[in-house]
Amino acid sequence: VCVGAAAEGGGGEGGGEAGAEAARRAAAVGLCASCLVYLGDLERYRATSGERAGGAGACAASAESCYWQAQRLAPRLGNCHNQLAVLATHRSDNLDALCGYMRALLAPAPFVPTARDNLERLCRSLVSEKPPPPPSAALASLGASDAPPGSGDAIADAWAAEEARWEAGLCRLHALLHLRRPSGGGSLPSAVAQLRRELLQRLRACARVGRLKATRVGTALLVCIGSLHLPPRVGGEGEPASEPAAATEALAAELLKGIVCAIAPAVPKAAVGPERPLAALLAALAPLALWSAHSNHRLACLAPEARREYADALAQIGNGLPASARSAAAAVAENGVA
């Protein structure tokens, strides 16, 4: 299928010898991408069966490498993202798994229905798990200082636990929004509001003390933006009534706004401190976030005050970045978002 589609697309431009050559090249690239996906699948199967001498970790790393190479060769295909999400699911990285399944569904050539079914299973599993405990009363005071917490294994372990909990809370939130109903009765908006409040409290505290990893923040933002564009889920026969799609869309938009506002105050510090990767990543995501604020009709469901808060937070992020990062973000924004 990949080869046939590539060949068909390549022959549409030009004619004669040049068109035939373009079609052959496109077909060869598609064939290579497909082979890499299949090689990755074989390595993934070996990881679960224990065949390879290097162990499951080596097989999983080899599979991941194959999938990423396939994705670079054929970036329009959703299959590669689905397979990467499957690997993330196996290693219990729910945030990466959510992001991968969403990218598989939102790709120009979406991997349906497999990615949709995988996302459904993941969300049901997340909702069935025990939610993260509420933040401790001391969390706000710990995070209120601009200085990092003192050294010591106990303090480091405590902050690592808070990092894991804000990720778990975010994943559970998106699972609820995707399924469009609470896990155990009650109101979906009230369940989401409580989880969002706890998530943002943890996120602000981690941001203030420099406990945010650039890759995890970036993945969280992509999940929030992606959730606004997923097609509304259709419930199965016999399922309890779910919230209207417009209502869950508004809740997802409010969550995206809240996360951007929570991390914005940490950017000036991150731009000059040891968290510079966070500043670089936010510079790369700034054009996408700006587009979502000004050109995405799905954020129109936010109240005017919420939209102003979102725009102010994006401006704070932009103004807190180094000059070089601001210039790069402006260039991307001027050329458009791919």
Image: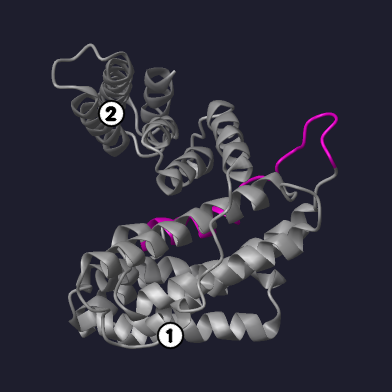
Which SS class for mark 2?
helix
Give the image quarter of residue 221: bottom left
Which SS class for mark 1?
helix
**In the image, which residues are magenta?**
217-240
* Residue drawn 73% across the image and 49% down it: 180
Q: Which residue is mark 1?
A: 141
Q: Which residue is mark 2?
A: 22
* Amino acid at the residue labelled 1: Ser
Taking 186 as reference, is 42 above or below it?
above
Q: Nearer the viewer, residue 139 or 179?
A: 139
* Amino acid at the residue labelled 2: Ala
* Residue drawn 24% across the image and 28% down it: 66
**Mark 1, residues whose alpha carbon is within 10 Å: few (<14), some, or many (≥20)?**
few
Asked if the stretch drawn in magenta spans residue 226, the answer is yes
Labels 2 and 1: the sequence-earlier one: 2
On the image, the x and y values in percent for residue 328 come to 26, 73
Give the image quarter of residue 116: top right
Marks 2/1 in contact by CB < 8 Å: the verdict is no
Quadrant the N terminus occupies: top left
Mark 2 or 1: the one toward you: 1
On the image, the x and y values in percent for residue 309 come to 56, 84
